[in-house]
Every structure is written in structure tokens, then in C-alpha cells.
Image (cartoon, grey):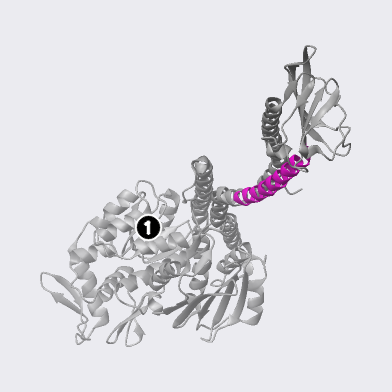
Amino acid sequence: MRQLSLRLRSIFLAIVLLAFFAPFTVVILDEAYTDSLTEAKMSELRLMNLGLLSAFELDGDLPYMPEILYEEQLNLPGSGYLGVIVFRDEVIWQSASALEYTFTPPNIDVAVGNELFLESYTPTFDKNANFFVYAFTAEFASSRDFEPVRFYIFNNKALFEDERSTFLSTTWQWIFTLCLALLIFIVIGISLVLLPVRKLIDEISQASRGEKRQLSSRYPVEFDSLKRSINGLLHTEAAQRTRYKNSLGDLAHSLKTPLAVASGHKTLPSEVGEALRQIDNIIKRQLKRASAGKTGWQQGIAVQPVLNKLADAMDKVYQEKALTIEFEVDDNIQFKGDETDFMELSGNLLDNACKAAKNRVLVSAKIKSGWLVIHVEDDGPGIPYDKKTLLLERGARLDTYEEGHGIGMALVADLVSIYEGRMQIEDSELGGANIVLQFPNHE
Amino acid sequence: MRILVAEDDSRLLTQLDALLQQNGYSVDLADNGEHALFLIKEYDYDLAIVDIGMPKLDGFEVIRKARQADISCPILILTARDRWQEKVEGLDVGADDYLTKPFHNEELLARTKALIRRASGQANPTIQFGPISLDTVSEELSINGKALDLTAYEYKVMEYLMLNPQKVISKTELTEHIYDQDFDLDSNVIEVFVGRLRKKLDPTGDLKPIETLRGRGYRINRSL
């Protein structure tokens, strides 16, 4: 099963964390707000209660309260603040704000000199509402003795609850907006953090396509050892490939000198000579097949310089023929593969063309719909139809090839097949053969 | 014609020596690169056949150093490494042709002749001076289309003179190019060969194909 991407994992984790912390934060804020609001309410009610206490007088057994109180809320009906005084278990006074209610003494008992604050109280005078209550009991001198007088302040909680719920909904809105902003920042942040990873992946794929030999970009320090390891691998792979080719070259060398001695022997029967020739051809072909190949980690090589080198060589070897070797190669054309393989391919084709040509050899290379197309043409006698088929037949016996277009063509066919290319033999406008090679994946 | 053969495999070296000698060449042998470089700098060869994989100094280095020392004799690379990269490298450092091992003796001889002829500026295998014609492939000398019967040494003298028409060739040079290195030099022998050649080519004495430049040597008569 495919694993989740790092980006998705990080986003998923961020969402889970936010989903847990956002409500938690709201609850904590609500608690703190409610506590502080309640504390403030208690202070407010205490002050009001003290106001009652200071305004109250007892003349013998007759209580006295002024008409208008200093605390405005207690004078206004519907203010939500109610003041009540109880003496000898009877309500002896209620504030102007509480005129609509009929009080019985509240069943809240407070010892003399003590205060009591209740955050939630449903009184008998209004069973549908919930009140804060602040109660205080003080002793006053009556006709008998010092007697307790209880002072109560009731405050309807509806306003308080409204305030709290407004706070809650505002908090939720802000927290939600913050979470959204945080999530956007996290997504952008993750993209920024993953940028070097993306760059590294791009560079590795460039190296795998052969466009780079080493990883050369600068990376965060955490990637230094990874970069070193990958560069080490690339270097080892290239060195191994070279070593492998050299070993095969050495093997060819050590096999061929004894073969040369054997074939040069004067008394060698002709059938043995033929067998030796076959052995030589097999060694030649198999060693080249073994050392050839694209690894997918090779750089593209420029086509023109290789062709120039080969043309110089051909000029020397075929000096007497005074051939004109022409090129029609588009700028910056590259062969995606090994240089020795490309040299082997084009060397064999050019050599064959020079052998066959009377005066002219034309090599052209261009990129067409993602394919590298190479033509090697000459003005020689051309290749007859039956020979064309034979040359294109893969696995045809080497000794069936004629000298000239012989083993070279078999090797070309092998290399073309290794590079998943195509080979055609056509007639050239110059009059001779036109060998067409096509290689895929050349954008 | 004097040829240097540089090859580290003693069996192949012996074989090449025998093959070239049988075909009328004087042959010097070297079994390592350093010796080959010494010989090629020391003596004036008509051709050097150089193996690439040699001890002490590889063939590429021998050729590079020889060319740096202005040695202009044609060089044929003999190599077991038949990749184009190596062929191109060899030709690039100054070789004139290559032959991959194993090879047919006939092919080696054909390349040898072609290179020697090419070095003398003769593109055609048949060299012509007036009525005298030398076919370097069939090794036949003819005058007015009529083949002459020459001994091997007479042919060698005539071939060397005709391949080098631009220069005066001393008896010593002629001797060096047609005999093996250890031959006891006797200039009279060359005089005898030239005398015989003159009689065979020009019995009437009208043609004068070989000029004698007193105290300096011989030269082919280019105004034939």
C-alpha cells in the first residue's frame, strides 16, 4: 500500500492538534472569564450590601430605611438587583427595585458577622430565574437586646449569562479564524521545509537521466551526509562501469594476441583458420555486448565532437580515397548513453560508409518527436535488398556477413537494441546506402 | 624497405619478423615500448608497426613521443583493443592506420605496402616515371609495358629510389633500407645493383633512369 506523503502527514497531524487544542483553549478562556466575572459580581454585591447596612437603622424595635438609596439599581424596578432585610424572621424591608415580588424570608442562614455568596440560587419569589445572592448578618440593638438583622442582595443571572455567552461566541469565532490562519501557515511552512527535499529529488532524477554527474546544489546541513552518500554512489557506479569496460578490454587483449599468433601460423589448415576467425568474431561481439549498455545514470554526450574525432580518423585511414565527409548535425544534440558505445556505433557505420563510398559520406543527426535520428549515407554501390534483410536480422550468424558490412553491423544492431532504438537500411539520395538509427527518450 | 616491429608477445614478434622478411623487408624488432622508441628515433624507418599494449611504454606513448621528436615515418597500430575509442586515440596521437588482432597476413602486407607508398606521396599503387612503371602490389617493374626480370635486391633498390624521387639517396641509406641492421655494409654491392639495374632498364644508354650525383648518391631521373 502506498504510504502517505510527508506533506499530508504533517497537515493531518496539524489538523488533529488544532482540533484538540482549539476547544480546550475555549474552555480554559471561558472558565477564566467566568471566574473573574463572578469575583467582580461578588465585590459589587458586597458593596451594595454594605450600602444597605449603613443605611439601616433600628429605633427600639422599629426598623428605618431611607426612601431613596445611594445604590441606584436598588431604586429602579426591573434593574435585576433586589435588596431585602429580614428581622426576627420577617421581611421588614425590600428595595424599590423589588416591588413586583412578594418575599418570604430566604432560607439562607448566615451567622452574625459572616457573609455568604451564592453563585446560583433559585428563590421562592421567582422560581423561573436564577440569582446571585450575597447575604450578611449584623447585630443591632433592639428594645430587648442585640438582635441579628439579615441583609440580602439578589442579582438576576440572566444578564451575566448573556454576557458570558457573547464572550463565548466571540472567542469561538476568533479561535476558529486563528486555527484557519495557523493551518495555512503550517501548509506554507511545510512546503518551505520540504523545498530542499523536492530539490534533492529533482537533482537525483536529473542524475538518473544522466543530465548531472554529481549533486551540486546547496542543501540544509541535515542533508549533507545524504548528499555525500548519493554522490559517493554515483561516483562508485561510474568508476565501476569504467573498471568493467577496462577489464573487458584487457580480457580482449589477452585473448586476441594468442589468436593472432595462431592465425598467423604458416602451416595452419584453412578450416582451423576459419574456426579461429569465428572465435575472434564471437569474442569481439560478446565482449562489446557485455560492456555496452545504458544504466540510466549516464550523462548525455555531445554528438558533434565524437563525429569530428571519427571523421579525422577516417580522413587518415581513407586518405587515398580523398573522401568528403559532411555533417548536418543540429546544435547541441546529445546521445543519451555511453560515449564509447556511441563511438562504436558511429565508428562502425562511418567506417562501412567510407569503405563503400566513392567520394562522399554524409552524416546527419537531429531530434524528431523525442527521438534522436541519425543518418549515415554514402555514394557507394548501396546494399542489395536481400543483404539489407540479413543485416537487420538480429541473431544472424556472424560469419554470414560479408567483409566490410560484416561484424561491424552486427555490433551496431546489438547496440541499437540495447539502447531500445531502431535501425533501418534505406537507399540514399547520394546513390549508396542510408543507414538510419533512431533512439527514444531524447527530448 | 626497413620496418620496425614493436610487439611484446615474442611468438607474434617472431612470426611478424618471418612474414615481413619473406616479403622482402628488412625488419628491426622491439619487445617493449622504450626499445621501440629508441629505435624509431635512432633509425630512419619506412614503416613502424606498433602494438598498443606493451610494457614500459605503451604504443600510444611511443607514437606520441616519436611524433614529438619529428619522426615522420608512417606508423601502423597493431592492437587487440578493437574499440573505436582506442583506434581514434591511436590515429589522433599520430598513427596512420590501425590493424586489429587477429589479422590476416595478407591484410598486414597490403596495409604495409599502402602506408609506405602513401608516405612517399604516391596515392596510386603503380608509380610511373616516363616509360618506367613500378607496381608496388605485384612488385613488378616494367618498361614500356614490358616486365623486367629483377632479383629481390634489385627490385628493392629500384622501389626505394622510385618512392623517394625528390631526394638524393646515399649508398649508406640504400643499404640501410634494403638490408637487415646487422649486415656488414659494403657500398660496392649497391654499385653492382645500380649497375645491373641500369643495364636492364636502359641497355642502349639513352634513357639514363638513375642519376649518379658524385660523392652524394643516386636519384631517379624525374625528367624521363
Which SS class for mark 1?
A: strand
Residue under pointer 1: B50
Q: What is the crowding at mark 1: few (fewer than 14 residues within 10 Å), some, or many (at least 20)?
A: many
* A420 left or right, relative to B209: right
- Numbered disc total: 1
* Occupied quadrant, residue A417: bottom right
Q: Is residue B74 left or right of residue A280?
A: left
Position in image of residue B14 (x %, y %) = 41, 53
Write down the region rendered in magenta. Answer: A156-185
Q: Residue at x 49, y 54 (%)?
A: A213
Tell me if residue A334 comes above or below residue B131 in the rendering: above
Q: Residue A281 in magenta?
A: no
Query: Can you say which quadrant of the picture contains the C terminus of chain A?
Result: bottom right
The location of residue A156, given as percent across then percent down, is: 78, 38
In this view of the protein, which residue sits in the foreground, B209 or A103?
A: A103
Farthest left residue?
B215
